[in-house]
Image: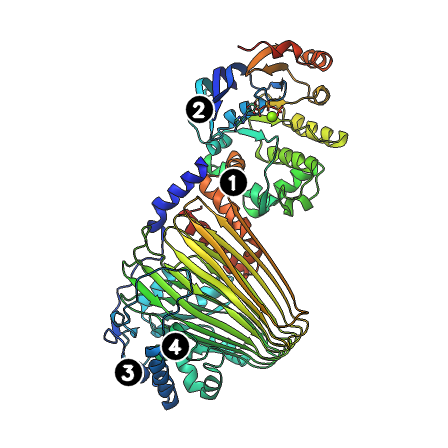
Amino acid sequence: MLEIKDLHASVQGTEILKGLNLTVKPGEVHAIMGPNGSGKSTLSYVLAGREGYEVTGGRIIYCGEDLTDLEPEERAAKGVFLAFQYPVEIPGVPNSTFLNEAVNSVRRYRGEEELDKIQFVKMLRAKTKELGMSDEMLKRAVNVGFSGGEKKRNEVLQMAVLEPKLAILDETDSGLDIDALKIVADGVNAMRSPERSALVITHYQRLLDYIVPDKVHVLAQGRIQKTGGKELALELEKSGYADFKGEAA
Amino acid sequence: MAATAETVEQVKSIAGEKYKYGFVTDIESDKAPKGLSEDIVRFISAKKNDPEWLLEWRLKAYRRWLEMPEPKWAKVDFPAINYQDYHYYSAPKQKGDGPKSLDEVDPQLLETYKKLGIPLHEQEMLAGVQNIAVDAVFDSVSVATTFRKQLEKVGVIFCPISEALERCPDLVRKYLGSVVPVADNKHACLNAAVFTDGSFVYIPPGVRCPMELSTYFRINEMNTGQFERTLIIADKGSYVSYLEGCTAPMRDENQLHAAVVELVALDDAEIKYSTVQNWYPGDENGKGGIYNFVTKRGACRGKNSKISWTQVETGSAITWKYPSCILQGDNSVGEFYSIAITNNAQQADTGTKMIHLGKNTRSKIISKGISAGKADQTYRGLVKISAKAEGARNYTQCDSLLIGDTCGAHTVPYIESKNKKAIIEHEATTSSISEDQLFYLRQRGISQENAVALVVNGFCRDVLQQLPMEFAVEAQKLVAISLEGSVG
Ligand SMILES: Nc1ncnc2c1ncn2[C@@H]1O[C@H](COP(=O)(O)OP(=O)(O)OP(=O)(O)O)[C@@H](O)[C@H]1O
Ligand SMILES: [Mg+2]
């Protein structure tokens, strides 16, 4: 699904990712943990193709194809989804209008027929219900005036609607109450299938009780420093990242 | 900044080509010779079969015009206009008298309007769900008015103003120039001297006009000015919603458009006037395009009357336009909702005047300005409250959105209040489309152009919602096209 080889990436001339290697097979869920500022969000932006995040070395192979030269919208259409650590507000654009535009843009790109209003609304209602969200949130402008938790839930709704092949969740659990956390986890689990994979960036072992990962990685100093199973998250909970901080490459 | 820069680049590269209304209709026309003189005024008057008083009115206007200075206060820049270089009358040639019904309209003209997306055949309009009566003005004359019979049943008069002079001369004479005086400003004065056609609407007391009325303006001929004059009278307790759309072919010369619109609302009457202005804006270097110098004003003469202006201004090389309300009647309401988009080398100086004279008069101004490319635009507004206007209130909100860093937006609000108890609120913001927003939308699969369009449409939402449904959809597309070419 995803194969990252010796990835180097810079932001405004500063190298943040320094030879990162990561392989995610179809159907797998990987958790990425690591200290603040270690490059987790940077990795997610690089994967999504954000401008200003320059790949200076290495390769990102997604479904057999090098992503490096693709525009963000092309990657999205090919099934890469990023749930943002800080979701962005779009004043005046109703959430449902935005989702409709997104779904049909992706369908157009894939050469599929666009959903008409009725089909779309039906699909959207179903997803909203599954996630225990209110229809009222669909009418409001994208993320405007949403609470922190509502924004995160809105990210999960977008993911559910777009049904990505590779979902990257950047601290989607931060700021969620227990009930919301379960909803988010259910949302991710509902999408688990042999064809879909997920990268879950988190600071809290707690989330991984609900979304059980196949692998846990520690990202520090711009590299994957350690990889283990679910139990690694529990270890980190106790010992912190002290072991990884001095080991700059 | 990179993504925005790229958008701006894209805007620049497609701009000129994207004007899809830029075709020319090859049709024989009947024209006045170039230039302006008393003889030309008499020529036009004769062509229109004016009554004697109107000829006098025109001549008086012409003489005043000669002496009037060009208005200089707007923040727009263009070479002096050579008024002798325009034709002041141009009409598609027709055999014998004017068309009596649509069947007699030149098929080429019908084709033109079809290309513009304005179906003039009533059957076609009925086939679609639209229920809009259309008056189509081609260069200087009205070529077709639809749905007349249905309107006549309820007593609504909707026809070319030249025809109204025959059908209801007293009404025309009573109200013509009563809101915009002949010598209001140089452009309006020129219009009074040479106006050729435009629409006339009269809604009788207590009648709610059963359909949207609409006029579609098209300049086709080269070096032709268009000087239409619209007069709408809503008698006591009546209601009408009126829409106006405009396009012109792409031409390298600047064309002059100096229209006048007068609205009169009597007691308890309401007029909703919407404009989607998409005159040819010129190419990306500012060559060609329409000079849109328009005077629009409404008088809320009666108590509890209401006039609301909604405009979507995307076209024209230069826009100079301040649809205004004179709130004479007690409890009358004036509203102005505006979206102005300038791209490339376009310039716009637009806004409104709300003149509060009556008691408890209220006005609301919502202006959304979007600037891209090297364009420059100014919101210029006046809120004036007279001493007698007890309980007057105004709320003004001006928001500017900048795309790229080579464009400009300015807000010039004037407030003159002679009544200490009046409540006047003013809010203004300036923002730009952020990288974060664009990346967020693109990450969801939305192309850069559509992402910009979405953000801009969101920015304009409060105003778009004021438009009648059919127009709102068109306007949204137009917002996208004009920036897509600039935004999506
Ligand atoms: N635009 C930028 N300009 C300069 N430095 C940047 C920029 N963006 C990120 N960085 C730096 O890159 C490093 C990695 O940031 P990143 O956001 O990827 O960390 P993170 O692992 O997601 O941290 P957190 O857990 O706090 O979310 C940080 O030191 C940050 O300051
Ligand atoms: Mg982060």
Specify whether disc 2 shares its chain with disc 1.
no
In the drawing, what numbered circle is on residue A68?
2
Label whose residue precedes the other's in the sequence (1 or 4): 4
Label whose residue precedes the other's in the sequence (1 or 3): 3
Which amino acid type is shown beneath numbered disc 2? Answer: Thr
Q: Which residue is mark 4?
A: B189
Q: Position of residue B71 (x, y in %)?
A: 39, 69
Q: Which residue is mark 3?
A: B38
Q: Which residue: 32% across, 60% down?
A: B249
Residues marked 1 and 3 touching at CB (< 8 Å): no
Which amino acid type is shown beneath numbered disc 3? Answer: Glu
Q: Residues within 10 Å of mark 1 (few under 14, many from 20)?
A: some
Question: Which of A169 and B34 lies nearest the eye of the viewer?
Answer: B34
Label whose residue precedes the other's in the sequence (4 or 3): 3
Indicate the chain on which mark 1 is placed.
Answer: B
Residue A148: quadrant of the picture: top right
Residue at disc 1, secondary structure: loop
Residue at disc 4, secondary structure: helix
Indicate the chain on which mark 2 is placed.
Answer: A
Q: Which residue: 39% across, 47% down?
A: B373
Which amino acid type is shown beneath numbered disc 4? Answer: Cys
Count the numbered circles shown: 4
Indicate the chain on which mark 4 is placed.
Answer: B
Residues marked 4 and 3 touching at CB (< 8 Å): no
